[in-house]
Image (cartoon, grey):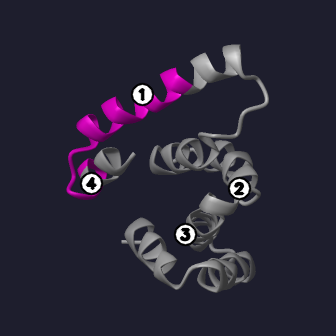
C-alpha cells in the first residue's frame, strides 16, 4: 500500500492504480477463503479513497476502526475523507480520535489531504 500511496502523490497515478489492483485481487482471495476477515480493511479503505471511491471506502475504514493496530490510521483516513467531503464535524471527530490513539498518525491525515 505504501508503494501505491507514494506513486499516487508524486503524480504517477497509473503505477499507483496498478499496485491498488493487486490489493483488490488479494481481497478477492481472502473473501473466498476467509469470508469474515477484516485483515485488509484499512488498505482496502485507503485504496478506494485514493481511487476517489468515497462511498466504497467508508465501510472498510469503519471496520478498520475496530482493529486495534489499524484504528489510528483508519481514523485519520476517515478524517481526510470527510475533509474532502466538507463534513467538518466528522473530520474533527475522527481526527481527534486518531491523535488520541497515536500522536504520530497525523502524518496519514497530512498525506491524504495534500
- Label 2 CA crowd tier, 10 Å (few <14, some 14–19, many 20+): some
Q: Nearer the viewer, residue 101 or 55?
A: 101
Q: Residue at x 69, y 80 (%)?
A: 97
Please report the bounds of the magenta region as a residue range.
7-26
- The residue labelled by disc 4 is 6
Residue 77 location (% of width, % of height)? 56, 64
Q: Which residue is mark 3?
A: 80
Give residue 69's mark. none
* The stretch drawn in magenta includes residue 105: no
Q: Please tell me in which quadrant of the rendered image residue 14 appears.
A: top left
On the rendered structure, is 114 left or right of 37?
left
Q: Secondary structure beneath disc 3?
A: helix
The residue identified by callout 2 is: 67
**Is 105 or 95 nearer to us in this picture?**
105
Residue at x 21%, y 52% (from the top left corner): 11
Of the two numbered discs 3 and 2 in the rendering, the one whose residue sits closer to the viewer: 2
Q: Is residue 33 left or right of residue 112?
A: right
The residue indicated by pointer 1 is: 21
Q: What's the distance in space between the residues labelled 3 and 1, CA to CA?
A: 22 Å
Give how far apart the Cα atoms at labels 3 and 2 are.
Answer: 19 Å
Q: Earlier in the sequence, mark 4 or mark 3?
A: 4
Mostly what secondary structure, the magenta segment? helix
> Gap between marks 1 and 2, in whole Å?
23 Å
Query: Would residue 101 appear left or right of 93 to someone viewing this image?
Result: left
Q: Nearer the viewer, mark 4 or mark 3?
A: 4
Q: Mark 3 vs mark 2: which is more N-terminal?
A: 2
Amino acid at each position: 500500500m505504501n508503494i501505491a500511496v507514494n506513486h499516487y502523490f508524486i503524480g504517477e497515478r497509473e503505477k499507483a492504480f496498478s499496485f491498488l489492483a493487486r490489493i483488490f485481487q488479494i481481497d478477492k482471495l481472502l473473501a473466498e477463503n476467509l469470508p469474515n476477515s477484516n485483515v485488509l480493511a484499512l488498505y482496502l479503505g485507503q485504496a478506494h479513497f485514493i481511487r476517489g471511491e468515497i462511498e466504497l471506502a467508508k465501510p472498510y475504514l469503519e471496520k478498520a476502526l475496530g482493529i486495534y493496530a489499524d484504528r489510528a490510521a483508519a481514523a485519520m483516513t476517515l478524517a481526510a475523507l470527510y475533509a474532502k467531503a466538507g463534513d467538518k464535524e466528522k473530520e474533527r471527530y475522527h481526527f481527534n480520535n486518531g491523535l488520541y490513539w497515536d500522536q504520530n498518525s497525523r502524518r496519514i491525515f497530512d498525506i491524504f489531504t495534500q
